[in-house]
C-alpha cells in the first residue's frame, strides 16, 4: 500500500512540475513588449497663401507667387493663364 502512495505522490509531483514549465514557456520573462517604431524626421509646416491652411512642405504645391494646399487654390490666386 505504501508503494501505491509513493507512486501517486511521484506522479502528482511530475504533473505539478510540468504544469509550471508550461506556464513559464507561455509567458517568457525576458521578452519586452513591442515598441512602436521611432518617428521619422519632422517636416516643416507652411501655410497656404490662399486660405492659410498649414500643411507639410512636402505636400504643398509650389506656384509662381507662393505655396498652396491644392491646385484649385493655386489657380484661384495665380490664374489659369499663368499656370500654362
Image (spheres, grey):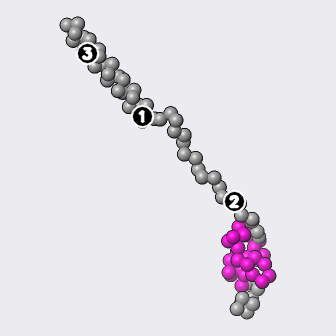
Residue 59 in magenta stretch? yes
Location of residue 23 in the rendering, given as x and y in whole percent from the top left corner: 41, 31
Cβ atoms at labels 2 and 1 below 8 Å apart: no
Residue at 32 percent across and 22 percent down: it is: 14
Quarter holding the C terminus is: bottom right
Q: Which residue is mark 3?
A: 8
Quarter holding the N terminus is: top left
Few, some or many residues within 10 Å of mark 3 (<14, 14–19, 20+): few
- Left or right of 20? Residue 59 is right
Element marked by disc 1: helix
Location of residue 45 in the rendering, given as x and y in whole percent from the top left corner: 75, 65
- Left or right of 6? Residue 18 is right
Q: Nearer the viewer, residue 72 or 41?
A: 41
Q: Which residue is mark 1?
A: 25
Q: How far apart are the alpha carbons under marks 3 and 2? A: 65 Å
Residue at 42 percent across and 34 percent down: it is: 25
Whether residue 79 is visible here, answered yes or no, is yes
Mark closer to the chain start, 2 or 1: 1
Q: Which residue is mark 2?
A: 41
Location of residue 31 in the rendering, given as x and y in whole percent from the top left corner: 51, 39
The number of numbered discs placed on residues in the rendered structure image is 3
Element marked by disc 3: helix
Mark closer to the chain start, 3 or 2: 3
- Left or right of 74? Residue 11 is left
- Left or right of 52? Residue 71 is left
Q: How far apart are the alpha carbons under marks 2 and 1? A: 39 Å
Which stretch did the figure color magenta?
A: 48-75
Residue 63 in magenta stretch? yes
Relative to residue 78, is residue 45 depicted above or below? above
Relative to residue 73, is residue 59 depicted above or below? above
Amino acid at each position: 500500500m505504501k508503494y501505491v502512495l509513493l507512486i501517486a505522490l511521484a506522479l502528482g509531483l511530475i504533473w505539478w512540475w510540468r504544469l509550471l514549465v508550461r506556464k513559464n514557456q507561455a509567458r517568457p520573462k525576458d521578452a519586452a513588449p513591442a515598441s512602436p517604431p521611432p518617428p521619422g524626421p519632422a517636416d516643416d509646416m507652411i501655410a497656404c497663401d490662399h486660405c492659410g491652411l498649414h500643411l507639410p512642405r512636402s505636400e504643398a504645391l509650389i506656384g509662381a507667387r507662393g505655396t498652396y494646399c491644392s491646385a484649385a487654390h493655386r489657380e484661384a490666386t495665380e490664374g489659369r493663364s499663368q499656370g500654362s
